[in-house]
Structure formats: C-alpha cells, structure tokens
Image (tube, rainbow, N blue to C red):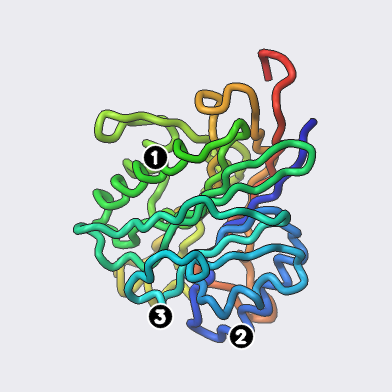
Amino acid sequence: MTTTVRVVTLNVWNSRGDAVARESLINAELRRLAPDLVAFQEVLPDQLPGLIEGTGLHGTHQSQTGATVPPYADRYGGTAIATRWPHRIVEVLDQRGADAPDVPWLTPAALVPLPGLDDVLFIAPTTSFRLDAEAQRERQVLALTDLDARHRTALPTIMAGDFNAEPGSAGIRYLTGRQSLSGRGTHYHDAWEVAGSGPGHTWTADNPHATEDIELLVRQPGHRRRIDYVFVGSPHAHPHAFARVRSADLAFDKPVDGLWASDHYGVVADLEVGLLTTGRG
C-alpha cells in the first residue's frame, strides 16, 4: 500500500510586518494546500493556533516540549510542526553551541502515523543564519543525521525546514551525498532537485519583506538564494520502503491584495510513500 503525503515548510517571520493580516493569509493558503506535514520556523507560540485554525492539523510549538528556552525566542520565535494525524514528539534538539550561542530555534523530531502504513519520522530543523556560519551549519547537519539515526523507522525520514544554506554549501552537499563531513557521509533526496522547476529561490530581493534583512546581512543588490528544503531519506537508510517525490513547488511566493505572507517563500512537495513488497522499487 502507498499513500500520498504533502509536505510544506515555511519561515513565518515571527511578528514582523502586519503579523495579524499575514497570519490570516498563511492560514487561508494552508487550508487551500491541505498539507499533511508542516514545518514552521520563526513562529511565536501564540501564532501557531491561528496559523492552523480550521486546517485539521495537530500542532506542537517548541515551547510546549518542555525543552530549554533559547535566548531571543520571545522576539524571533521558534520552530513548530503541524501534522494531519496526531504525532508524538520523540526528541527536541538544541543546536546551540560555543560557536552558535544565540540560535533560538530548537529542532523537533516526531513520529507521525501514516494511514495504512506505519510511523514516519518527521524532523523540522533550522540552522544558523549568518553568511559566515557554515562551520556551525556543518556541525548542525551532522547532529541532524544523528537525530535521524536514533529514531528513524522503516519509512523514509522526512526533513523540512529553513537551512539558511544554498545547495552548493558544504552542509547541503553533505545531506545530498556529494561530500563528506568529519569523515562521515549520508544521503537524502532534495525534493526540489528531484521535481522542482527553475532556481527555486526562497529568500530573495524580489520579496519586499526580505529587503530589510538582505540589506542588513548581505548588502548586495539582487540577492537571491534557495535555502528552504524538503528532504527525504534514501534507500541506503530505508531499504524496504520509498518516498518518491512526485512534485515540488514554491508556496506563499506571491502577494495577495498587495500583502506578502512572509519574508521567505515556502516549499510544498508531494511524496508517494510506501513499503516495498519485493526486493525492488
């Protein structure tokens, strides 16, 4: 048996801009998209109920997990997940370190039961955001693969979030099997690379909400990057199952009545998930 799973990731941009109107816009688009798994970044605890109201999704904010409260979380928000079916949080990873003391986003990992199949592990990371923080991000993606190894199931792990890194960066190259880090290797499929069209930029000067931070952090004209991803585990870690990427598109990437949903565009990917009945897929 197989099932289709729609995955969405979106950096909500906390309470900046017209947060109330943006929350309503994000909620309306989520109702239209009808996702099964959602990874939110930079979301405040009191925003989550409004974002998923009427969608049928079950949400958990990092503040509900009983983990530590990182600095600046009250200002920049944290990570949250929402799932079509009730989920169970199995671990929350704190990605701060001596080299990254101010990262306010925790990484939840949840087991989500897929109808007719089994549990799937859903991980919703956010990594260090500064342009010069690739060494931090390398450490953080290594920790993500350890997190996966501790809790993965037969079904391919699904990981979605704002990685603050371009496809050619060391951390993303590691996740997609193109290079090793610290003598280690792994492999996940990048949904956009499999089924997306065009550059897939998710943080871009074309979005007026992004221009202030681009000027603050980059200070170069026309800045555009793809830094938001949906990844799925490969056959190397899940030899008896599959998560075939059937489509990958941008979401929340156009204004509605002049209002942009966030400073990031989101990503939506449709996966065909199933267990193999024979030795081949």
Which sits earlier in the primary sequence, circle 3 or circle 1? 3
Callouts 2 and 1 close, C-beta under 8 Å: no
Mark nearer the viewer, 2 or 1: 1
- Tell me: residue 7, above or below residue 76: above
Whole-percent x, y for residue 200 in the image: 54, 51
On residue 75, the disc is 3
User: Of 174 and 73, which appears nearest the observer?
Assistant: 73
Q: Residue at x 64, y 46 (%)?
A: 248
| Label 1: which secondary element | helix
- Give the residue pinned by disc 1: 146
The quadrant holding residue 211 is bottom left
Whole-percent x, y for residue 177 in the image: 41, 30
Left or right of 31? Residue 50 is left
The amino acid beneath tag 2 is Val
User: Of 89 and 55, which appears nearest the observer?
Assistant: 89
- Give the residue pinned by disc 2: 20
- Tell me: residue 118, above or below residue 112: above
Left or right of 1? Residue 21 is left
* Gap in angstroms between the C-alphas marked 2 and 3: 16 Å
